[in-house]
Amino acid sequence: MSRLPFRFHAPLAGVLALVLLAGCAADPKAVANAPLRGVPLEYQARPDGERVVPAVNPVYLTERNRRRWVEYAGPEGKDTIVIDPYARLLYHVVEPGKAMRFGIAVGKAGRGFSGNAVVGRKESYPSWQPTARMVRADPALYGPLAGGLRGGLDNPLGARALYLYRNGRDTYYRIHGTMDPSSIGKATSAGCIRLFNQDIIDMFDEAPMGTRVKVRSRAESLALEGPMHELHTGYVVPEAEVELIAADQAAWEAGQIVDPAVLEAQQHDAAVAAARLAGAGN
């Protein structure tokens, strides 16, 4: 292989997470010296300026969610980011036939765009403000945040954001971090393309302004990834994974998987309470 990005060789050590993260004030040196068991180095807690990005819970580091080197069969060339909203994967192509693959969460906005774009803006710990449409659709959740939310680990955009542009205009399509690592690998009700904060931090450094981005259509996803099956857990796997699909179905029938509708309602209630707290703090 030719030279690969250094941070990929040797990485550094919804609103629901607001409450959980509000008390984070750890000493960066202490956190760095206390690795979480079962978590790969790249997903351990890491100092990030004045903040400390928490380690990713190993429960969320499924095979499809963890970053990994893969052979890449798509037509895109070197230094291209490829997003597949249907397989819920993001590829950073570093040379023909070789890419770093990441698991992603895909919001509704992430399923309404396809084609080519470029990274036209980059922000570290970006601020966030719900759109008027979001406030109208869910005033209990987004109303308290209508004035916007300062950047930070309790912000829906997470640690970094890449803003995609086409023909010099903002597409309103973003690749960003998350305050809710449990969402990675799943479909979400809001947002665009989320990565674990550790992944977007490294992607941010490896994707300069002007980086080419390709968002696959459903037809392109089917041609390159094959048909996907959504498990009762909310993750997707290739339909060829028949044993995994059968095990998921058996667990569902045995009542071992929480009903996603019930879980979503519980998370929404908690998110509303956290949004009121965040709104009051701003």
Image (cartoon, rainbow, N blue to C red):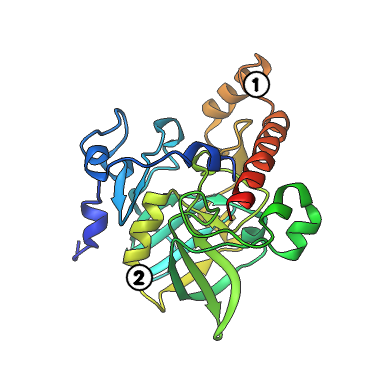
Residue 5: percent from the left, percent from the top? 24, 62
The crowding category of the residue bearing disc 1, from other C-alpha atoms within 10 Å (few below 14, some 14 to 19, many at least 20), is some
Label ID, residue 191: none
Image quarter hosting the C terminus: bottom right
Seen in the image, is 265 located left or right of residue 56?
Answer: right
Instruction: Choose top left, top right, bottom left or bottom right for residue 269.
Output: top right
What residue is drawn where x is 41% and y is 33%? 57
- The residue beneath circle 1 is 252
Residue 184: percent from the left, percent from the top? 51, 44
Identify whether 93 is placed above or below 85.
below
Label ID, residue 79: 2
Is residue 42 among what the camera can see?
Answer: yes
Residue 207: percent from the left, percent from the top? 36, 69
What residue is drawn where x is 64% and y is 52%? 279
- Residue at mark 2 to residue at mark 1: CA–CA distance: 41 Å
What residue is drawn where x is 46% and y is 35%? 60
Image quarter hosting the N terminus: bottom left
Number of numbered discs overlaid on the protein picture:
2
What is the residue that sits farthest to the bottom in this orientation?
A: 168
The crowding category of the residue bearing disc 2, from other C-alpha atoms within 10 Å (few below 14, some 14 to 19, many at least 20), is some
Tell me the SS state at disc 2. loop
Amino acid type, residue under disc 2 in the picture? Asp
